Every structure is written in C-alpha cells, then in structure tokens.
C-alpha cells in the first residue's frame, strides 16, 4: 500500500519563487515515486520481528522447550481463552505456563500446528492453528485462531477464537484482506 505524500512539507518557504504549477508537478512526481518513510520501514521490520517471535513460540512449545517458551512471555501476559473454555483467562506468565504444562501433562503427545499463514497486523500476529493431543483417554483435536500481541519482543496478550472470521474482525480485517496481505 502506497503511503500518501505529506503535502504540508511543501511550503512557500521551501519554494519561495515557485508558482502553483511547481507544487502540482512535485505532487505528481511524489505520486509516481513515493518517498519511503523510515518510520514505516521500521514498523514493517518490527512487525516482521513479531511474526518471528510467534513462530519461535510455536517451535519451542512443540519441541517441549518450556523454559524457552516461558522466556518469550512478558511477565504480565494475559491469555484470553475461547468461549466455552473451562477457565476464561490466565493472567501472568506463571498462570499461562501452568495451563500449557497441564495440557502437556494430560496427553502423552501434544502439538499446536499453524494451519494458516502468519498474518502481520502491526503489533499483533494472527494465526489459525490445529491442536492435537493424544495419550490419556480420548484424543483431542480442534482448530482455533490466535491473535497475539507482541511488545518489546515478548508475547503480552493471546486471545483465542473458534471462528477465524471473528478473530480477523477484531482487527478490522476480512478474510479477503488477510489473503491479500499474506
């Protein structure tokens, strides 16, 4: 998406003898050749780093490296579970880790596998996942979408949704928008 040119940067002080035609020509040139914004490039790089934090969290959890996973969470992390989950939310790194460890202990084998692209939504990352647990009692299989907020390289907030479209709507996105950006 092309960033609009800030026309307020061109003033009569910048071009004291230039007629209005010059302003129009400069405006057309900037439409054809937009000036890259260092802030936008920094935001894009940071949001890509957020995607990498979330990918690394999946890898750590699936490999069983719970110490590495624990370090990826902010001490004040909040996990808001999907509707119908036995506990609606977990507050704090230790509470979130306890929930994840209980899931791992309930089954001999568990995995949370991304089944969609990681959608970069600024300081948030959206991903659809398939969870599988087997070992003690019946197998558990379900899909859900996570909207994960990353700040300062740490996961600060995880919100789960059964419905992928609803998760996207919380960010003002549609399925079509999500596919266009990925």
Image (cartoon, rainbow, N blue to C red):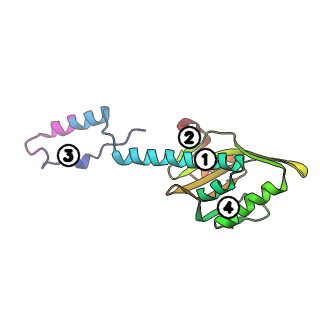
User: Left or right: 41 with respect to 148?
Assistant: left
Q: Which mark is residue 56?
A: 1
Asked if residue 157 is among those painted magenta in the image, a careful observer would answer no
Q: Indicate which disc, 4 or 2, sits on the residue closer to the N terminus.
A: 4
Comparing marks 1 and 3, which lies closer to the viewer? Answer: 1
Q: Indicate which disc, 3 or 4, sits on the residue closer to the N terminus.
A: 3
Q: Residues within 10 Å of mark 3 (few under 14, many from 20)?
A: few
Residue 136 in view of the camera: yes
Comparing marks 3 and 4, which lies closer to the viewer? Answer: 4
For the residue labelled by badge 2, is the local secondary structure a helix, a strand or a loop?
helix
Residue at left offset 20%, top offset 46% = 10
* Separation of marks 4 and 2 at Cα, in angstroms: 24 Å
Tell me whether the residue at label 2 lies in contact with that at label 3, contact meaning CB atoms closer than 8 angstroms. Answer: no
For the residue labelled by badge 1, is the local secondary structure a helix, a strand or a loop?
helix
Q: Nearer the viewer, residue 137 or 122?
A: 137
* Separation of marks 3 and 4 at Cα, in angstroms: 47 Å
Q: Indicate which disc, 2 or 3, sits on the residue closer to the N terminus.
A: 3
Q: Which mark is residue 80?
A: 4
Q: Indicate which disc, 1 or 3, sits on the residue closer to the N terminus.
A: 3
Residue occupied by mark 3: 10
**Residue 118 placed where, x, y %?**
60, 42
* Separation of marks 4 and 1 at Cα, in angstroms: 20 Å
Q: Which range is magenta?
A: 15-25
């Amino acid at each position: 998406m092309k960033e609009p040119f800030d026309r307020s940067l061109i003033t009569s002080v910048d071009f004291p003898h230039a007629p209005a035609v010059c302003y129009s020509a400069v405006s057309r040139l900037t439409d054809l050749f937009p000036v890259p914004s260092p802030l936008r490039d920094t935001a894009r790089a940071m949001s890509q780093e957020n995607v990498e934090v979330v990918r690394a969290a999946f890898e750590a959890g699936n490999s069983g490296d719970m110490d590495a996973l624990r370090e990826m969470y902010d001490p004040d992390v909040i996990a808001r579970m999907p509707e119908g989950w036995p506990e609606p939310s977990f507050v704090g790194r230790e509470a979130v880790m306890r929930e994840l460890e209980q899931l791992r202990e309930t089954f001999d084998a568990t995995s949370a596998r991304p089944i969609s692209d990681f959608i970069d939504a600024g300081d948030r990352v959206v991903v659809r996942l398939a969870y599988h647990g087997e070992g003690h009692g019946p197998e558990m299989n379900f899909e859900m979408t996570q909207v994960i907020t990353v700040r300062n390289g740490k996961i600060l907030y995880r919100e789960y949704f059964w419905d992928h479209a609803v998760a996207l709507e919380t960010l003002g996105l549609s399925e079509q928008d999500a596919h266009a950006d990925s």
